Amino acid sequence: MATFPGGASVSTLTEALNQDPNVKGMFWSRLLELSAKTNDDFSRLEGEEDSLKPFWKKTDLKKGGGDTIVFTTFGDISGPGVRGETPLTGNTSTLDFGTYKCQIDYWRDGVEITKKKENFLAAGNRLVATIVNQLGKKLGRKRMYDMMIKCLRVADNKKTNILRPNNRQSRDDIRTTDVLTPTFLVEAQARLKTKGARPVGLELSRSGSPVYHHLLFVGQDAFADIRNSTPYQNALNHAAARGDANPQFSGKVVPLNGLHIWEHVIVNPDTKDAIGSPMLPQAILGEAITAGTTTFDIKGSSDANSKSEFFAFFPGFDYVWAEGQDANPDTNTYYVWIVNPPDAAVNPGKAGFYSYTGSTGNNGKKLTVAKRLGSAASGDRVTKLGEVEWDSDTMTDAHPVGSTIVYANKWGTPIAFNFVFGAGTALRAYGKIEKKDLKESRDYGFVNGYGVESIFGQTPTVDTQGQPRNYLVLESAVEPTGVRVPAVEPA
């Protein structure tokens, strides 16, 4: 087998054959079937500054990678003014200014393949075109996920624009019944209006009163609770014409109390990398876990050299938006379920409950377990973890490769993060390279690399006090499709 320079990650024909021998020389198919992919939904929500779009795009920047762009903002004018003959001089109102920053940097990615693999695979000459296309899609997803995590991180730090059903005061207070409902969405839009969020749409009622619209950006699992609710079903029945075109039959998403809805489809692609979304953190177990009394690492791969950040969407991970940014230590305690596949040889469908500590327990590649739930207390194993108690009927502490890892709170409630956006929620700043395809050859042209690069940065807009006003984060309970966690009720 050929060897390549140390540190190189070259995809060879031999490796492809080891994964699936049918990829070579099968004349019945010369097409490369694409896996299910997610798209950058946010790109369709971009607009120019002062537009009604949630994300304002800055395209007039000529900065290089690593530069910081400073934006100026100002608040409402403060002061009472004067009446009568009282001199205005000396009694004028004040105008508060503030600034916030957006750092832009390079992001690059690429794939290297041998000429032999390029020429001998059944995919034929479509392989290169497919690689270039998929790298472009990955760049789009990268921008979208960066924006999601930035909005979540700012909200988590400021704590002024997070809303939870039933007035839950913290994420760890959320119970399984605290799902998204039409009533809660009305409350969310009222909260956003109170914050002075710009609407994404405006129309007038018959009386001439302005009707402000904001945008609910919601994953399909969290939206299922709204779809199935009686108020939403009644709205579909009575607010649209009957017949096959009625949204109840067509599946069309309709506004609710003036709130526009964007159903964001979260896909778990067949990739050896992070799956799910920052809105619904999930991962696939890559190394089996055995029962025991000591702590261990939850891994996304058994390959110690894997560069993938399987747990980048899970809380605690010190996500990087620009090279050289300051560390952001996190000492909070977080919880996950590991759910065995329904066809597992042992304990099918049963789940285990585990905790880890912030950034020290989540380096992206693995979760270092702090405590594990088990049948008897010993070592680092406990019979009650958070508010979850051991139940041998539904739980196990041994898991095969392929088990699903789901983020939850101390009650064992899986958590979803969704958004309500107003206009100008955030800025997307692009440098002098918005998207550029790359190609590199070495070893006399036998190894070819195909890549993509971009210079960009993103940040939520804030007011003069540094507070985000134009969006809300909705934290709620959710039941991820295809994953059943044990029912845990409060004592």
Image (cartoon, grey):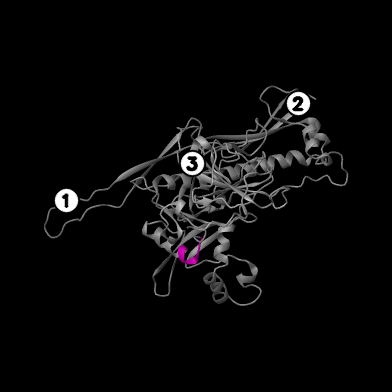
In front here: 210 or 463? 463
Residue 249, quarter of picture: bottom right
- 463 to the left or right of 481: left
- 143 to the left or right of 128: left
Residue 297: give x, y in percent of width and height: 59, 36
Question: Which residue occupies 66% across, 74% down?
Answer: 244
Residue 300: give x, y in percent of width and height: 63, 39
Which of the labelled discs sits on residue 300, or is there none? none
Q: What distance separates the C-alpha of mark 3 from that of mark 1?
A: 40 Å
Q: What distance separates the C-alpha of mark 2 from that of mark 1?
A: 75 Å
Residue under pointer 3: 60
Residue 300 at least partly seen:
yes
Residue 326, quarter of picture: top left
Residue 301, quarter of picture: top right
- Three-letter code, disc 2: Gly
- Three-letter code, disc 1: Asn
| SS class, disc 2 | loop
Q: How many marks?
A: 3
Which of the labelled discs sits on residue 91, or is there none? 1
Q: Check whether the beta carbons of the residues at disc 2 and disc 1 lie within 8 A of each other.
A: no
Foreground: disc 3 or disc 1 = 1
Residue under pointer 2: 445
- Three-letter code, disc 3: Asp
Q: Estimate how packed mark 2 is, as few (under 14), some (14 to 19) or many (20 or more) residues with alpha carbons within 10 Å.
A: few
| N-terminal-most mark, 2 or 1 | 1
422, above or below 21, in the image: below
**Residue 152 is covered by the magenta coloring:** no
Residue 347: give x, y in percent of width and height: 68, 50
The residue range painted magenta reads 179-184
Foreground: disc 2 or disc 3 = 2
**Residue 180 is covered by the magenta coloring:** yes
